Amino acid sequence: MNKRFTALLLILFVLAAAAGCGKKKNSASPDSEANIEVKEEITQFVNETLPSIQSRRDKAIEVYDSYFADGSKMSAEEWLTVLQNDSVTGFESYLEALNQFEAKSTEVQELKSYLVQMATNERDAVNQVVAAISNTDAAYLSTAEDKMKAADEALSQYKEKLTSYCRTYGIIMNGSFDPATDGDAEAATEAETQAETEAK
């Protein structure tokens, strides 16, 4: 009886295994409709969406870096004013525009989330510098530095994910991740990173 039961279990196991061995449609195929949509959305995000809003962030970084420029005669009070009026508002404008973009794919949602983290940390770093100047308290600068490091990390994660998705979906990247500025707010200009769909 035990032999029959064991044999029956073995037969059922083999049948179940055979049923699971059928040819499945490969959803990871670069030519699948879903993958073509993701490829197009990534390309649109990098080539159209980001360049259309990048100048807001670039201006915010330029204002921040202006104090450190060679030959700058800007006083701390003047810098405080432009940080509040131009740099912080520039980051907020960039974040608002970025958040208005509705990503359909999880891939573009993830790319967008890294850029939101980056710009949020950059804005928060500038706010810490504003607090340091306003309160004449250098302790805020340590937090500002931590925020800039977090922004750099988010940018690094964005670059890695974008590169990975480009490989996965057959997208060719033109350009490079160059620093947007030579100052303390180093970050890549996404507008310079162009992605185009590989011609078949």
Image (cartoon, rainbow, N blue to C red):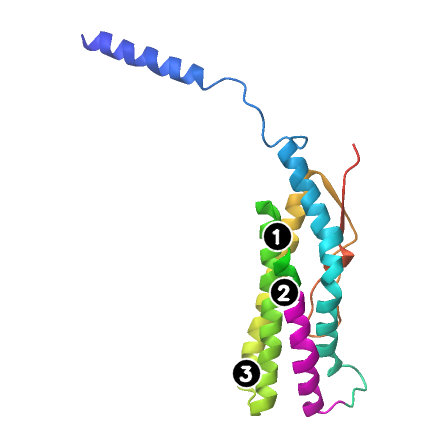
Residue 167: x and y in percent read: 68, 41
Question: Of the numbered discs in the image, which one, if any, rests on residue 102?
Answer: 1
Q: For the residue marked with disc 2, what is the amino acid? A: Glu
SS type, badge 2: helix
Crowd class of label 2 (few under 14; some 14 to 19; many from 20; radius 10 Å) = few
Crowd class of label 3 (few under 14; some 14 to 19; many from 20; radius 10 Å) = some
* Side of 47 relative to 117 (left or right): right
* Side of 10 relative to 124 (left or right): left
Range shown magenta: 74-96
Residue 63: x and y in percent read: 73, 78
Residue 31: x and y in percent read: 68, 30
Q: CA distance from mark 1 to mark 2?
A: 12 Å
Q: CA distance from mark 1 to mark 3?
A: 35 Å
Name the main secondary structure of what is drawn in magenta.
Answer: helix
Question: Of the numbered discs in the image, which one, if any, rests on residue 140?
Answer: 3
In the rendered image, residue 77 lying in the magenta stretch gets the answer yes
Q: Nearer the viewer, residue 100 or 188?
A: 100
According to the picture, the residue beneath numbered tag 2 turns out to be 96
Q: 12 above or below 62?
A: above
Q: For the residue marked with disc 3, what is the amino acid? A: Tyr
